[in-house]
Amino acid sequence: MGADKLLSFEEAIEKYEPVLGFEVHVELSTKTKMFSGAPNEFGGAPNTHVAPVDLGLPGSLPVVNEQAVRYAISLGLALGCSIAESSRFARKNYFYPDLAKNYQISQYDEPIAFEGEVEVELDDGTLVRVPIERAHMEEDAGKLTHVGGATGRIHGAEYSLVDYNRAGVPLVEIVTKPIFGAEDRAPELARAYVATIRDIVRSLGVSEARMERGNLRCDANISLRPRGQEKLGTRTETKNVNSLRSVERAIRYEIQRQAAILDAGGTIIQETRHWHEDTGTTSPGRPKSDADDYRYFPEPDLLPVMPSKELIAELRAALPESPAAFRRRLQAEYGFTDSEFRDIINANLLVEMEQTVAAGAAPAQARKWWLGEILRIANARGVEAGTLITPLHVSELIALVESGQLTDRLGRQVLEGVVAGEGSPDEVVKARGLAVVSDDTALLAAIDEALASQPDVLDKIRDGKVQAAGAVIGAVMKAMRGQADAARVRELVLERAQA
Ligand code: MN
């Protein structure tokens, strides 16, 4: 497999128009699976969360998970879709070892949700409307682990292990229509679209939507057509790209790869492709099957899903504020500039910010701590800032600093303690003995000691050179390892001079 030839991105876009499309699979966080009572839990020893239905054992029959249907309807509504009065499950037939039944129960010609639209915001605030074709329910397959190969892929592996814990986990697959007009911002739009779906799903609480765990998986389609040509080009589908940044990179790479082939007079093969994080390239997967190959037919073991108008109205009324509206509202409330606000969004800290402010912190202080010290620690450790500390603890920390019980410097030490799991800010203050000392007796003792080595300071102050007090304050702060209340020390030194 030789290296692909690439055209420069700029030249590719000048000659060809990119047309995007996405299939995003979202694992629903129901208690049990889509068609069985087995637990839907991440982790667990292999093949322990498995019911007969998940293995396709003879005589086992599927039962639709009501909560999964409710989640799918909520998600469909949040995507601006119409909800079908009647929708049907269908069998999608194919053999693969991670699918013990030899078919996946999915939806085909009657999906539960169809014809929606999602507003996606690019980094500079440009809004793009992405048309949604459908959102349908289906079940996940099991997970194969290939052992012995160099890359963990099937090629070169000596044997493979199968874990059916994931088999039957409820999924919603969200399919877009072709997306035109993204032009040179196609890679950025790809990332922003997946981020938007993730945010919507999280705001609904229907999935944890953690890409690194596979709760949210994106297949990114892209085709190119020469400028001025109406007919769509042949598309490729890059599978299971598992981070937002990878989605952007994969689309950019495919544009450059396909452009080079077209430029050389070649043809694009309709196929799935694998994204390789390490090399930043894609490689061929399998030729893309057409729907005909799957011999879809209505699932005979399940009744159509016919949600009542009342249920749909109830779920519509319960929809939370959309992430886009949430963002607009918070920016207005916080009074931040566009760029100040974008920093928060880019750091994925909007929810944390809102909860910190809701717990009592001023927006400017919340922004200072989250985007400052907390983000610095998070970046150093390569984790999300939101996983380090709870918004409540950040708010408590800010209150301690604002009330003068902690200096900024002590606040940072308390933060380190909280992040290290030593407890709440109050508990860390106590355990580490970090509070600012404002007890006059202790402060006066330190002041007298400092004055003993700088006896002329009091005379200078009496002569009107008040700034001379700075040397004593500095010495006291140093002696008390930063824990003195500097304002009180200053007052006490001036009182000493008047005595
Ligand atoms: Mn699917």
Image (cartoon, grey):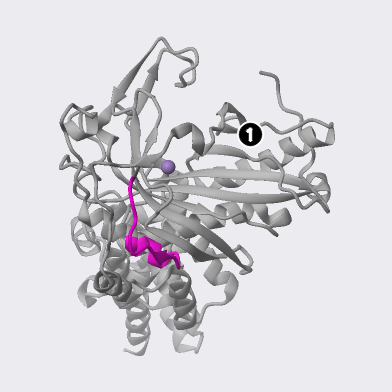
Q: Which residues are magenta?
A: 73-89
Q: Residue at x 34, y 56 (%)?
A: 87
Q: Is residue 481 magenta?
A: no
Find numbered disc 1 in the image and state the secondary structure of the residue it sits on: loop
Q: Which residue is mark 1?
A: 270
Query: Could you tell me which quadrant the C terminus lies in?
Result: bottom left
**Can you say whether 17 is above or below 424 in the image?**
above
Q: Judge the density around disc 1: few (<14), some (14-19), many (≥20) Cα neighbours within 10 Å.
A: some
Mark 1 CB lies closer than 8 A to ligand 1: no
Q: Residue at x 46, y 75 (%)?
A: 325
Image location of residue 337, percent across then percent down: 57, 77
- Is residue 262 visible in the rendered image? The answer is yes
Q: Is residue 226 left or right of residue 96?
A: right
- Is residue 479 visible in the rendered image? The answer is no
**Can you say whether 488 is above or below 347 in the image?**
below
Image location of residue 228, percent across then percent down: 83, 54
Residue 333 quadrant: bottom left
Q: Residue at x 72, y 43 (%)?
A: 233
**Can you say whether 499 is above or below 428 in the image?**
below
Q: Is residue 466 left or right of residue 489?
A: right
Residue type highlighted by circle 1: Gln
Image location of residue 31, percent across then percent down: 19, 49
Foreground residue among 181 and 353: 181
Q: Is residue 87 magenta?
A: yes
Q: Residue at x 73, y 39 (%)?
A: 256
Foreground residue among 290 and 312: 290
